[in-house]
């Protein structure tokens, strides 16, 4: 242990680290694309430090995206896009509404459930916020919810897009840290559902206090009839998440194969239902390619960034600096959670994973945290940042589609931030929450 401390203490960071970081921050503030900001910082860092040859950037750009697992990313994005265009996403809403209509606050609960259903297919929180928000915000207002609260509810529910597997975020962090995406999907199932349940319960509690939405005046027979009718008219929509979950969790399909199968099944359904035409494909593919084109360049620059930071000793230096103040694991975990939530407020998941995962992972190792537990905690904490005022990404998405003031929405997200934070703390301090579903050999 003493040798490790001496090694960590020997790391000293100079201007060859701080100037590139300053350049990165300035570029982000100027709204320059994140991949360009990361790439510029890496090049300047290599030129100033000379710890690695500059040719590393060119080589690593291709190595960074030369991974079979990454082909699942555009497939899940495309599946979500096809789902919306074919109208299958509305079948999810019909079933969710029928499932919860017996209770007071039923449509609010249905909104959260359909966010979870959409998350199980698209793996993207922003896509879920936009798709579900367009379907539900106006109806939530008609049901009695104040418009700012309705927007906050959709924003919170959409956080499950990166938390409920299969999630693009888990594919990326698995690639960055060398962890199987299928293993992370399995581990994330209970934490993801716990987040969904916490949002549901919070909405029910808030609704009980303020009586936003009535309902619940329905006999068991009436509820059963409505639920059966909704399932009968839209059961086929659940084939898509069913294929994804069964294929991945049974081990019969890799995430990439499950994504490809989901795309094909969704397209076939669209043609059978006559809600999808060949003329829709160009716009659909371009839309998905734009989203994918934002993610992949960031991943491409992740490898040279990680290698440069490791050569400079940044992860080791960070661990030493933090542990020099305290070695209490409970405090260190709180510090990591705070960093992740703050980062989630400012940037999307992908750059946060690329930048922070290699730096925070050694600190997690230092306090004995399992790598699976660390990955789940990191993604979940970043998800909390998506609705944390004043810069949460989902807040801006729902503000854009609803026209509601971002300031008004932020005044209503407090209960959801708190309930999600509780789940994050459970994941961080109780390893079983994130490892219960794993075989003993992986725990």
Image (cartoon, rainbow, N blue to C red):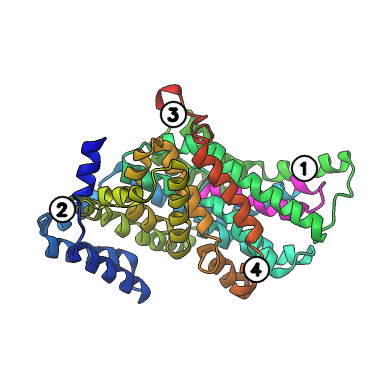
Q: CA distance from mark 4 to mark 3?
A: 46 Å
**Left or right of 158: which side holds 74?**
left
Q: Residue at label 3?
A: 252
Labels 2, 1: front one: 2
> In the rendering, at what x and y percent does residue 127 appear?
52, 59
How far apart marks 3 and 2 lie (CA) works out to 34 Å
Residue 55 sits above or below residue 442 on the image: below
Of the image marks 4 and 3, the number of the one nearer the N terminus: 3
Which residue has dot 1 on it?
A: 227
Instruction: Say what secondary structure mark 2 lies in.
Output: helix
Q: Which residue is mark 4?
A: 411
List the residue tagged with mark 2: 59
Callout 3–callout 2 Cβ contact below 8 Å: no
Locate residue 229, reporting x and y percent. 77, 43
Region of the chain picked out in magenta, as a range: 98-124
Instruction: Look at discs 4 and 3 and give the one toward the viewer.
Output: 4
């Amino acid at each position: 242990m003493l040798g490790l401390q001496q090694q960590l203490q020997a790391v000293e960071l100079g201007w060859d680290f701080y100037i590139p970081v300053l350049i990165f921050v300035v570029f982000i503030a100027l709204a320059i694309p994140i991949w360009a900001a990361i790439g510029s910082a890496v090049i300047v860092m290599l030129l100033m430090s000379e710890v690695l040859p500059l040719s590393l950037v060119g080589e690593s750009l291709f190595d960074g995206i030369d991974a079979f697992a990454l082909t699942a990313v555009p497939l899940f994005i495309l599946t979500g896009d096809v789902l919306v265009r074919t109208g299958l996403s509305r079948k999810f809403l019909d079933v969710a509404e029928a499932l919860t209509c017996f209770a007071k606050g039923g449509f609010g609960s249905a909104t959260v459930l359909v966010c979870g259903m959409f998350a199980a297919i698209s793996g993207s929180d922003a896509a879920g916020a936009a798709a579900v928000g367009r379907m539900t915000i106006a109806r939530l207002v008609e049901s009695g919810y104040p418009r700012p609260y309705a927007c906050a509810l959709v924003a919170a529910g959409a956080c499950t897009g990166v938390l409920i597997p299969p999630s693009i975020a888990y594919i990326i962090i698995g690639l960055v840290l060398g962890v199987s995406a299928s293993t992370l999907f399995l581990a994330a199932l209970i934490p993801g559902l716990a987040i969904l349940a916490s949002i549901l319960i919070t909405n029910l509690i808030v609704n009980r206090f303020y009586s936003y939405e009535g309902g619940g005046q329905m006999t068991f027979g009436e509820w059963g009839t409505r639920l059966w009718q909704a399932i009968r008219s839209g059961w086929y929509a659940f084939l898509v998440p069913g294929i994804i979950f069964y294929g991945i969790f049974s081990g019969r399909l890799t995430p990439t194969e499950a994504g490809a199968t989901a795309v094909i099944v969704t397209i076939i359904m669209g043609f059978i239902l006559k809600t999808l035409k060949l003329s829709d494909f160009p716009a659909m593919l371009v839309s998905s390619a734009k989203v994918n084109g934002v993610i992949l360049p960031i991943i491409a620059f992740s490898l040279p960034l990680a290698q440069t930071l490791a050569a400079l000793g940044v992860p080791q230096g960070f661990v030493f600096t933090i542990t020099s103040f305290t070695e209490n694991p409970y405090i260190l975990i709180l510090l990591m959670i705070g960093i992740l939530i703050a980062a989630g407020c400012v940037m999307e998941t992908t750059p946060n994973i690329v930048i922070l995962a290699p730096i925070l992972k050694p600190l997690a190792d230092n306090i004995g945290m399992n790598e699976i537990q660390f990955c789940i905690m990191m993604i979940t904490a970043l998800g909390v940042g998506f609705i944390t005022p004043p810069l949460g990404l989902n807040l801006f998405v729902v503000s854009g589609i609803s026209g509601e003031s971002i300031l008004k929405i932020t005044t209503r997200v407090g209960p959801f931030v708190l309930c999600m934070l509780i789940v994050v703390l459970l994941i961080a301090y109780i390893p079983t929450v994130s490892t219960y579903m794993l075989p003993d050999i992986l725990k």
